[in-house]
Amino acid sequence: MTKTDEEHVRAVATSFRILEALRESGSGVSAIATELDLAKSTVHNHLQTLEHLGYVVADDGEYTLGLRLLDLGYHARRPYRLYEAAKPEADDLAERTGDRCQVMVREGTEGVYVYQTSGEQAITTDSHIGTRVDLHATAVGKAYLAHLPESDLEEILASSPLEQITEKTTTDREALLEELEEIREQGVAFNDEERILGMRAVGAPILGQDGTVLGGLSVSGPTTRFQGERYHTEIPDIVRRSARVIGIKATYV
């Protein structure tokens, strides 16, 4: 790689860092420069280019993400037939439970939410469409891991440390493998405050007709509502059924 090529790569990386800095809210050149430890002139030049391309919008010195990014997001999600099959089932599940429903696929060693929808009682957290999550710390992720071929599971566990996210996150490999075995037998996984304290979730794998795991489906809510019979029986039964329907639709759509 030539020096010019390296400069181009760094420039692209800087543009994406700036876009990510704008993800939560609008901001001005000075604030972004301070946050990213970049020169104001550098940030200004990148923002001007991104604005020209339609990826950011300027309003009275404040920059926000442009709607052209929605087109990229749509095309990024298009290859997943799972999304089209899962959306109506996830919407129905959120309406029936009143809580938040997530559809996840794997990318590398992480899970990515390709769809998320909320019922009337859903609690707002830090997750949204596009959020990347640790597979071992989520119900939907553990449901996915439990149904992978052993070689794929070993590869993921070998390359991804079991990070301690909350005091309840499972970080012991053998304990996780035992839990995954139970999940395979039950067809459902539980997240008991392992990613966010005060929040629980129930997840199930979305399987193709040949048994290949396509993704995962989960419902999450506060511990005050996710307890007793509802947490251990009612919601798991609903999530399992919905995941099976999505698997059938994703196979034949």
Image (tube, rainbow, N blue to C red):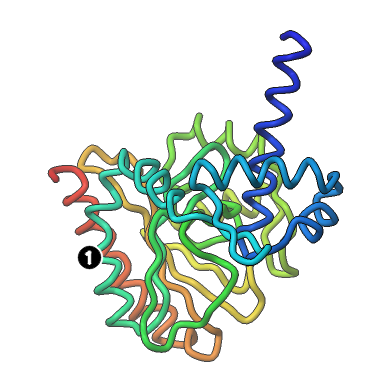
Residue at image coords 38%, 47%: 71
Q: Is residue 142 visible?
A: no
Q: Is residue 195 left or right of residue 172?
A: left
210 in relation to 18, above or below = above
Q: Is residue 70 visible?
A: yes
Q: Amino acid at mark 1?
A: Pro
58 in relation to 76, above or below = below
The image shows residue 151 at horizontal and vertical percentages of 50, 29
Residue at image coords 24%, 74%: 92
Specify the quadrant that holds the N terminus: top right
- Determine crowd level at label 1: few under 14, some 14-19, many 20+ residues with C-alpha closer than 10 A: few
Residue at image coords 81%, 52%: 33
Label 1: element kind: helix
Q: Is residue 123 left or right of residue 87?
A: right
The image shows residue 8 at horizontal and vertical percentages of 69, 23
The image shows residue 99 at horizontal and vertical percentages of 40, 80
Q: Looking at the image, which is closer to me, 224 or 4?
A: 4
Q: Is residue 245 left or right of residue 169?
A: left
Identify the residue position indicated by label 1 in the image: 88
40 in relation to 87, above or below = above
Q: Is residue 75 left or right of residue 152?
A: left
Residue at image coords 22%, 54%: 85
